[in-house]
Amino acid sequence: MKRIIHSICVGFLLMSAILAPNTVLAHQQKEAYTTILVNERTGNLEIAHRFSIHDAEHVLKQHFGIKADIISSSDTQERFAQYVRLHFAIKASEIDNEMALLTVGHEVEGKYFWVYQEVKLPQKHDVLWVKMNAFQEVWPKQTNHVNFEKGRNIRSARFKKDDEWLALELKK
């Protein structure tokens, strides 16, 4: 009987040692996703940002020193939407000024918080210059993925800590 109990304990410890590093690494992988869609019908660029609620609350607490409850606090939701507005920008060319993005809403969906923005489609929109540095002041290894979609064409960029503006070019 002692041998069986010992075997079970050793097995449990081995499984814990194997699984624990994977759990820690999975939690440390910080990523956020943004999609920019060209809506030819409305003449707008439609932007949707998706963030982990856990990460968003952590950043709000760390960055602003506030108790963050995105799920049930509309004030916290609005504060985070403001944070996103400060960390995301689009230009029509490398030398143009940033476009004035309109925040059209935000919502909680499962374990994610979404922030929605839009702006009038620029005359030339086969190339967009984008900046996305949300969370990178808190987590230097944060990666922000941005997809630019026009019809069936999709281009992607990954923003790391030291990236400023990246060009997303769509082929005609």
Image (cartoon, rainbow, N blue to C red):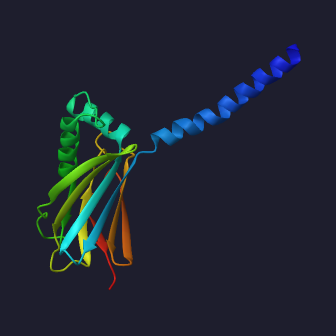
Residue 33 x, y percent position in the rendering: 36, 55
Q: Nearer the viewer, residue 153 or 110?
A: 110
The residue that appears at 18% across and 80% down in the rendered structure is 124
> Residue at the location (22% across, 28% down)?
65
Residue at position x 18%, y 51% in the image: 85
111 horizontally vs 118: left or right: right
Question: Is residue 167 among the parts visible in the rendering?
Answer: yes
Q: Position of residue 158 (x, y in %)?
A: 37, 59
| 105 over 46 or under it: above or below | above
Quarter of the C terminus within the rendering: bottom left
Quarter of the image that includes the N terminus: top right
Residue 45 lies in quadrant: bottom left
In the image, 86 versus 47, the foreground residue is 47
Q: Which residue is depicted at the point 30% across and 55% down? A: 49
Q: Looking at the picture, tell me which residue is in the foreground, 81 or 31.
A: 81
- Extreme residue toward the bottom, this view: 172
Q: How many tags in the picture?
A: 0
Foreground of the two, 143 or 112? 112
Against 16, is 48 above or below?
Answer: below
Q: Position of residue 130 (x, y in %)?
A: 25, 63
| Residue 3: image location, x then y, percent | 88, 18
Q: Is residue 15 left or right of residue 83?
A: right
From this viewpoint, is residue 165 visible?
no
Which quadrant would residue 79 be assigned to in this image?
top left
